[in-house]
Structures are given as structure tokens and as C-alpha cells.
Image: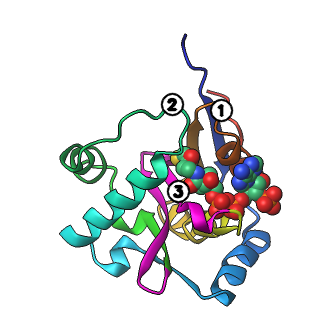
Amino acid sequence: MAVHWVKLELDVAGFDQDRFEQYVTKCQSQGLRFTTLADLGDTPEHRRALYELNKECAADIPERGEFYSFDEYVERRFEVASYDPRGVVIALDGEAWVGMAATSEHEDFMFNEMTGVRAGYRGQGISIAMKTFGMTFAEECGASRVRTFHHPANASAIAMNRKMGFVDAVD
Ligand SMILES: CC(C)(COP(=O)(O)OP(=O)(O)OC[C@H]1O[C@@H](n2cnc3c(N)ncnc32)[C@H](O)[C@@H]1OP(=O)(O)O)[C@@H](O)C(=O)NCCC(=O)NCCS
């Protein structure tokens, strides 16, 4: 049966940055650090770490199926014109990579490629904090919207996005 993806979008100008910045502050006060792949260094080692984190988190996406091989991931996520390491937010607990929010840049919108938090770190506002941290880059790019889509059974991801102000996309 065909899947009816839940397509959502966020109006960048209408995003309540002050409200959601509190998620960033709270996580930082608990010892987490937010950075980007650009700032950490877009190195082969860091690309591999991102892949491993993405693969682990993607295992919890409903009906995701088998994840890409590393070579496929590189081809789809890094070797594309829409890739920019400034759009890949990483949450760190010490040296451990515990969350990622990867966004790609398109003509007039940003696309959320993947948001994931390691299972033991969920339910603490980390995904909202990462996506809020990443909004600065969306603004710098001049994007008017951030778009995403989810499997309809992915209740946590859909609720998380709606909480940030994402609404059903019109097209
Ligand atoms: C979706 C995911 C990224 C959420 O990360 P998280 O850091 O645990 O989410 P947060 O703590 O920031 O929660 C933010 C909001 O999302 C919603 N939410 C999060 N987990 C939820 C759950 N299990 N059920 C329902 N709503 C949930 C809530 O509205 C929550 O706000 P609240 O706690 O104030 O009610 C995480 O569950 C995950 O990595 N899932 C596997 C990968 C995935 O499906 N990614 C999305 C596809 S790209």
C-alpha cells in the first residue's frame, strides 16, 4: 500500500527563535554542546561518525528498512550540490556524538534530511535544541521555509516538528 508521507514546513520568518532558544540553553546547562560539521571539521573520520549516528537513529524510523552502505551515504548526502557542512548540527556529550540534525540547501528552502538522537538521550529536548541551533544557517542562506517529511507512523518526529511550528505543507 502506498505510504502517505506527512509533509511539513516551517516559515523561517515566523519561527519563534526566543522561545526555542531556551531548549538550547537548557541542554547546554546540562553539559551538552552544539556545533556543526563545518566547525568540527568535515573530515573523513567525522563523515564516518555522522554515518554511524545516522544509521543507529534511522533504525527507529518506522519502515525505514535497511540503511545505506557508507559509500551510498557519501554519494547521497555529501557528494550533492545541496550539501553544506554548516547545515549539519551535532550534539555532543563530552566527545560522544549523541544527536544530529542535518539540513540541505535548496533554491528557496532548506530540507531536513535527518534528525536523530541516540535512544538514551531522547525526551530531553535535544532534537528541538539542535534544530533551533540550525535555524541561524537557514536564515543566513536566505531560505524562506524549512521542509521535511515523515512516515505517518513516526509520531515523535511529527510531534516534535509541530511543536516547533511546522505545519502541513501546501504543495
Ligand atoms: C524524533 C526524535 C529525533 C526526537 O528527539 P528527542 O530529542 O527525543 O525529542 P525532544 O525531547 O526534543 O522532544 C520534542 C517534542 O517532540 C515530541 N516527542 C518527542 N518524543 C516523543 C514521543 N516518543 N512521542 C510523542 N511525542 C514525542 C514532543 O512534542 C516533545 O515535546 P515535549 O517533550 O515538550 O512534549 C527521536 O525520537 C529520534 O531520534 N527518533 C529516531 C529517528 C527519527 O525518527 N528521526 C526523524 C526522521 S528524520
Q: Nearer the viewer, residue 123 or 12?
A: 123
Q: Position of residue 6 (x, y in %)?
A: 64, 31
Boundaries of the magenta span = 93-122
Q: Are marks 2 and 3 in contact (CB under 8 Å)?
A: no
Q: Earlier in the sequence, mark 3 or mark 1?
A: 3
Q: Position of residue 95 (x, y in %)?
A: 41, 84
Q: State which quadrant residue 18 falls in.
A: bottom right
Q: Is mark 3 within 8 Å of ligand 1?
A: yes
Which residue is disc 2 drawn over? 63
Q: Which residue sits at x=75%, y=77%?
A: 22
Q: How many neighbours does mark 3 have within 10 angstroms: few (below 14), some (14-19), or many (20 or more)?
A: many
Please indicate, yes or no, whether residue 165 appears anywhere in the rendered image.
Answer: no
Determine whether the residue tagged by mark 1 lies in a helix, strand or loop. loop
Residue 161 in magenta stretch: no
* Mark identifier at residue 153: 1
Q: Which residue sits at x=33%, y=55%?
A: 83
Which residue is disc 3 drawn over? 116
Q: Position of residue 108 (x, y in %)?
A: 49, 46
**Quarter holding the C terminus?**
top right
Q: Nearer the viewer, residue 69 or 108?
A: 69
Residue 114 in magenta stretch: yes
Q: Earlier in the sequence, mark 2 or mark 1?
A: 2
Q: Earlier in the sequence, mark 2 or mark 3?
A: 2
The type of residue carrying mark 1 is Ala
